[in-house]
Image: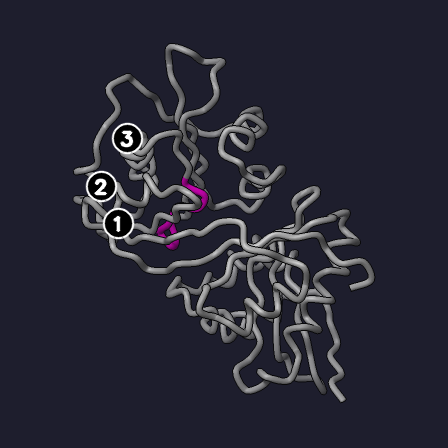
Amino acid sequence: MLRLVARAARPSDYDHFARLFVELGIDNPVLPRERWESALAKDTLFFEENGEVVAYAYVQPLREFGYVRHVVVAPSHRGRGIGAVVMRAVAAHLRGRGCARWCLNVKPDNTAAVRLYRSAGMEQVYTLTTFQLAWDAAARLPRPARPVAARPAEPSDDAAVEAAFGLLPGQAAEARGRGGLALLCLVDPAAPGAAPLGYASFDPFVPGAFPFRVAAPELAAPLLDAIRAHAPRAPEALLVTVEDDDALAAALRAVGATVQLVGVHFRGAIPDGG
C-alpha cells in the first residue's frame, strides 16, 4: 500500500530539489542553494516514502489561483500513483491558502501528466512556447513607429499589468517577492495613465523572461532592449516564453529564434476534499 508523507521543505532538502528538478526536462540551470532557500523553499512540499524523498511540488498561491509550477516524481517511483497523491496534497495545501482554482503548464507529449491533470479537473486553456533568442537576432525585430519607454514595474503597476495582459491576480507581486528578478514595464510616455504596452519578468540566472507580454509584436524589441541591461554579459542569448500569442511567436521565428519547449496551460477548479 502506498504511504506517502507530505511535509514542508527544509533547508537540508536542497540536494533533493537539485536531484529531482532536472527530471522536469526543461534544460534550465538548477538554482543555487541560496536562491532556492530564499525564493522557492517556502512554497515547496516534499513527499517521503519510508523516509526516502520520492517527489516534490513547488506551488505559488496567488489569491484565487494556485500556480502549480513543479510536480516531479523520482523516475524509480513512477507508475505507482504517486502523482495523484501529490496532486491531492497540493489541492489541500492550496485550499488552505485560500485558493479556489489552480493552473499549471505541461508538455503536451507528457501523456501521463496530461491525463493526471485532466483527472484533477483541469482543461487546456492555451499553448505556450519557450524560444531561445540570440541577442543579435533580437536586434532584427521590427520596431514601433511611436515612441515608447521602459521602466521598472512598481507595485502600483501590478493591477494594470495583470488586467492588460491577462496575468493571474497577484502574479506580479509574487514575482517581486521572490527577489532576484528584473520586473519591467513598457509604457507610452505621452499617455502616462494609459494601459501598459508590455511587461516582462526577467531572471538573469536562467537567463530568461517569463512572463513576457506585449500589446503588439513590434513592442517586443524595446522591451528586450530594457531586459538586456539586466542580462549577464557572457550569454549570447536568452529564453523568452510566449503565451497565447501567435503573432509574437511568428515574429520571433522570423528572426531565427529556435524553439526550446512547447507547452500547454491548464486551469480548473480545485476539487473539494482532494
Who is closer to the viewer here, 222 or 7?
A: 222
Q: Distance between the residues labelled 2 and 3?
A: 11 Å
Write down the region rendered in magenta: 204-212
Task: Answer whether residue 127 is magenta in the image.
Answer: no
Query: Which residue is labeled 3 in the image?
Result: 218
Q: Determine whether the residue tagged by mark 2 lies in a helix, strand or loop.
A: helix
Where 8 sits versus 192, above or below? below
The residue at 76%/50% (across/down) is 97
Q: Distance between the residues labelled 3 and 1?
A: 15 Å
Q: Quadrant of the N terminus?
A: bottom right
Mark 2 / mark 1, whichever is N-terminal: 1
Q: Which amino acid does label 2 sit on?
A: Ala
x, y percentage for residue 273?
82, 62
Front disc: 3 or 1: 3
Front disc: 2 or 3: 3
Q: Which amino acid does label 1 sit on?
A: Leu
Where 89 sits versus 223, above or below? below
